[in-house]
Amino acid sequence: MNYEQFLQEQTRRHFFRQCGVGVGAMALADLVASSANADPSGNPLAPKPPHFPPRAKRVIYLFMAGGPSQLDMFDHKPALNRLNGQPIPPSYLEGKRFAFMDSSHRINLLGTRRTFDQYGQSGAWVSDLLPYTSKIVDELTFIRTCKTDLFNHAPAKLFMNTGTGQFGRPSMGSWLTYGLGSECKDLPGFVVLQSGPRGPRGGAVLWGSGMLPSTYQGVPLRNRGEPILNLTTPESISESQQVQVIDAVGRLNSKRLADTGDDEIATRINAYEMAYRMQSSAPDLMNTADESAETLDLYGIKDPKEVSFARNCLLARRLVERGVRFVQLYHTNWDHHGGATENLEEHLPSICREIDRSCAGLVLDLKRRGLLKDTIVVWGGEFGRTPMGEVRESTGRNHHIDAFTMWFAGGGFKPGTIYGETDEFGFGPVDHSVHVRDIHATLLHQLGLHHERLSVRSQGLDFKLTGVVPASVVNEVLM
Amino acid sequence: MQENAVKSFLGNCQESIPLFFLANVSFAYLIAGSPLFAEQIQFNRDVRPILSENCLACHGFDHAKREAGLRLDTREGALATLDSGHVAVQPGKPDTSELVRRILLKEDDDECMPPASSVKKLSDKQRQILQTWIEQGAEYEKHWSFIPPVKAELPVRTNELNAEHANPIDWFVHAKLVQNGLTPSKEADPTTLIRRLSLDITGLPPTIPEVDAFVANWAINANDAYNDLADRLLRSPSYGERWGRWWLDQARYADSNGYSVDSPRQIWKYRDWVIDALNRDMPFDQFTIEQLAGDLLPGATEQQKIATGFHRNTQINQEGGIDVEQFRIDSIFDRVATTGTVFLGLSVGCAQCHDHKFDPILQKEYYQLFAFFNNQEEPTLTVYPPELNAADLIAEKKQLDKVIRDVMAKMDSAIETWEAELTEEQRMELPKETQKILSGDKKKKRTAPQKEILYAEGIGATDVDFKKTRDRIRQIDTMLEQGVNTLVMKELAQPRKTTVFVQGDFTRPSEEVTCSTPSVLHSLDKTKSNLNRLDLAQWIVSPANPLTSRVIVNRVWQNYFGRGLVESENDFGMQGALPTHPELLDWLAVEFIEQGRSLKALHKLIVTSNTYRQSSIDRPELREKDRENTFLGKQRRLRLDAEIVRDVGLSASGLLSSKMGGAPVYPPIPDGVMNQGQVKREWKVSTGEDRYRRGLYTFLYRATPPPSLNVFDAPEGNSSCTRRIRSNTPLQALTLLNDAAFFEFAKALEKIIEHNGIEVAFQRCTSRTPRADEIEILGKLDRLSAARVLLNLDETVTRE
């Protein structure tokens, strides 16, 4: 086969027509390899079949960075209030390690100041901090016995995202786009949104692609300035100049493709097409003018231009509507140790107000749009907090890894489910401990991927999100 | 596009039998399905990959995970009578071998091996190979990479290999091509060659006069011209920068502490040491010793201490509430893993929690290696410019400080008297700083320097000696401020105790161990007591080491051809890929040692081969028969490394600064990048030529890496990187199109178009002259647009 034939074999499609920008016909579009081509190098993000029929197609992961206090929100423990101020029985602490071990070896139980009640058909306990979440408990699946291995923020966040505290491993979103590709032609397959006073501890490694190509790494969608780095055409360049440049790059690259027969050039031509589409689709995404006042209200968005977790929840819905595979929202800061700026009295209620209405709004909005059935919403932090109190300027709790609460909604999770029981203080599980790797296995399973089969070979080993210790799908929480 | 995941030799799918396998094993079997092989089964080539992939996780070296008491990693184990009474392997008797019975069972049978639950599955071919191997006697071989390399006899030169300047590389490569019914590609044209060679050796494109001169010399004597070019480029200091970055990837170099806080750190002296060592062509054994143990060499020089920064490129967690010991241990885990990966090409890190499942490395042996790295302090060394004579200055200052102290020791009451007698007027005449000291009412808490000031302004105003002494001290201080900090290693006088950690958990120490090396490799001189890092370094560079020279040669080769002769460049263990050209790899490894471990000699040998000089243009024959270019029937087009993408842009637009070394710089980056991490870091854009330095000098924050480098797959320095992925993404397109730095290059290139024409600009980007049809496309654009197009061409960011 000569190159002319090779090029003719490529499918013919006109992306500029698809994206609705009046650029006119372009020769290069005819030459571009598409996913129809047997060689996958044409588009590394082309949709790929799962291992088995999936229950869910996409994930919105609401990451509560810093470690939310389950004992003041979901895990109701009257014994804590009864024994407030008394030391926890030593049997609980033997062989345990905590953050701030040297300086704050605090062993006295701390009762919650919150009032708890049961809600919905499921009778889930929720505290008064979350009035909106309490109304949707029958949509949610609570796991109260989540377990992680690491108790410092950055390593624990890495662990929750990559299944290991070691660097250089792919994050969950990278695994999913690697395994399934993306159904969105004009936005990245894995998008990260941030809100709160600071970025999450750990930074870019949390959405890194590790030993997978950077194609699969999370792309931060920025709330200020241009939504994606370098998305905007330089100021002095007009729209038509930009189109001419991209057109000419495509034409010249096509000639080089014909000269050299290197498939990588076809991939690059594809990449320029997508880059161009992103230039218009990303601003469209960010422009929420087409959202009704009622919808904004559902999320609790007062000013749609203002950066907030609520706005990010709305953007998350807009992203999954467009076929984005994995959307991860980080909201800081949940690290309530009891300091002057991070305590349970003032700051926990305040951050709960920031997220409560929009989390519930997101679930309801997805549901009424028919998206919840195949979209998984995940809510949780990198760990939970201790039943023992920390007293600094005010009161707080230390990092805790033995049992903490996460909730899931949609995507085939059994709604109105409460799974896992903790002991009288909420220190450890009395049944059904669910390790991070089990959570990973379960999420992959819902997306049609077997956690033992989704692997990449590096250093002679098959690396997996769930690592080497056996993981299990938590079937009890699935429909 | 990334390389395909390394496939084991036989692969899992029927279609992907490598051609060299077809060539070596009887076609009769493959076609007719006969169990008989015309050729002898070779354990390493044919059997080990099957066992390693499918069996050894449960029947291997890790005794804790061994099932049914069966181990298949040794012949003794395979032939042993098991508790069940069965014998897995009976040489010559496949029919009575339990292994054969088990692998032939139906998948749903509980006894079928590998079990259905393992997700592993044998193909029919693999089953046949195991049977035939047993039939032929079930011989084992030591793993290929643990056998020291020897130079094989060069293959017979065939007539087709007629180029006069072919070197031994070509003999090996050509023999393999012929064996597989392929032919080499023709030599690339001289313009392509000079661009390829310049980018590969120096990371910079050739200038137009360099291209013209080379093409002219080529016309006279192509081979001489090419050899001279290679020599010139290898002498260029830019060589150290380009290949320095190759090494810094492996050394996981970056300019910050990592984890969440990610404070900046100073360790760029180490980066400069690497560049300098490569430019001086420091033999690789010395290069290794100085980095692993430079501080332990007798009379260690400052430079040798700086070199130990290699293992100070670990991250430091500055988060609140951490257990410092935990992260000290983590950094040692990193050092052990990095040493294994970089110098041995082995994933020794796997034995941190358990015996290695695939390679014969015991968990205990892991902690014996760990012990070498468990005995250090981690100090900061201040490095002064050599002309400063800092040691003398520091001694002088110490002496002068004592003079001042002696004077001041007797002055307290005199100063107080003076102060008490000061009138308001006199007070107002004193310098601001002095007044401030006087106005504070904490007389008792005044510092020594404050008292000195009061003395100098008051009763000591006429003390000429005192003034002279103070001035000299200040002068010395100013000179010493030129000192630069860098992180180094230092051995503790009293070794720390090292133990095995159960499951790699440092809170669960068990058996105590001392320094040693894995027994599967060459032996360590154990007659010495108190072994330390220097002994480890010398063990690594020992001529008896079967791994290091192969690993390094392969990693150099990989940069020139896009893939190593061993594709799994960081794993030469049993799970790794087999070499595609084993004799060539071994020949190069031995040659490397014979040439005094000179990296420059190795580069010269590779780049002057016909194999390297081939055209990278695809041919239908190769596309059909060797799509992955396993047999090197052509060169490969390779997208440039991240830093070089920048360097080419800078060079094409005439902005590039040639300044070498020194503190990292801050070229423009998009707004808001630096507040992605937990702590917002300052990024004060460099001015003057520092704005236009080569990519490798850009400040690297691990948590918020520079986007334009990151997007082109530059590593973040979180762990050792032995091969860069080459992705090809829309974000790269957006960077080249819209990033402020690249737009600035475009505007400079616009000026070049204005003054010198589009052809010159085209040539500055691609090194070749444009064709008429290309000019036609560019001619329709305004100059700035044309400049932007040129900087965005695939060809501009590719070496062909």
Image (spheres, rainbow, N blue to C red):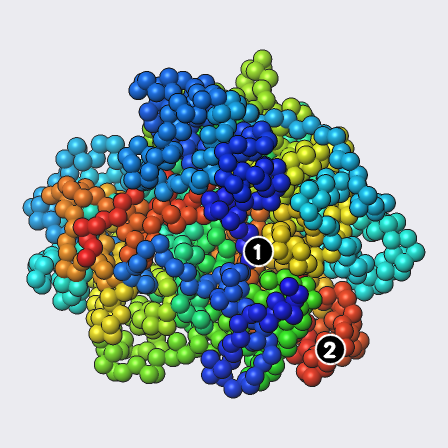
Helix, strand or loop under label 1: loop
Residue B144, picture quadrant: top right
Residue at left 69%, top 42%?
Answer: B179
Task: Quadrant for the N terminus of chain A, please.
Answer: bottom right
Which residue is under mark 1? Answer: B726
Between disc 1 and disc 2, the foreground one is 2
| In the foreground, A337 or A26 | A26
Q: Which kind of residue does numbered mark 2 sit on?
A: Asp
Chain hosting mark 2: B
> Residue B71, position in %: x, y?
41, 24
Q: Is residue A375 left or right of residue B12?
A: left
> Residue B744, position in %: x, y?
64, 71
The residue at the far top in this view is: B527
Please indicate, yes or no, whether residue A287 appears anywhere in the rendered image.
Answer: yes
Please indicate, yes or no, whether residue B482 appears anywhere in the rendered image.
Answer: no
3D distance between C-alphas at marks 1 and 2: 30 Å
Mark number for residue A414? none
Q: Is residue A82 left or right of residue B279?
A: left
Helix, strand or loop under label 2: helix
Q: Which kind of residue does numbered mark 1 sit on?
A: Arg
| In the foreground, B549 or B184 | B184
> Residue A237, position in %: x, y?
59, 81
Residue at left 78%, top 72%?
Answer: B760
Residue B542, picture quadrant: top right
Mark 1–mark 2 CB contact (< 8 Å): no
Residue at left 75%, top 43%?
Answer: B170
| In the foreground, B23 or B763 | B23
How many marks the image carries: the answer is: 2
Q: Earlier in the sequence, mark 1 or mark 2?
A: 1
Chain hosting mark 1: B
Q: Residues within 10 Å of mark 2 (few under 14, many from 20)?
A: few
Which residue is under mark 2? Answer: B773
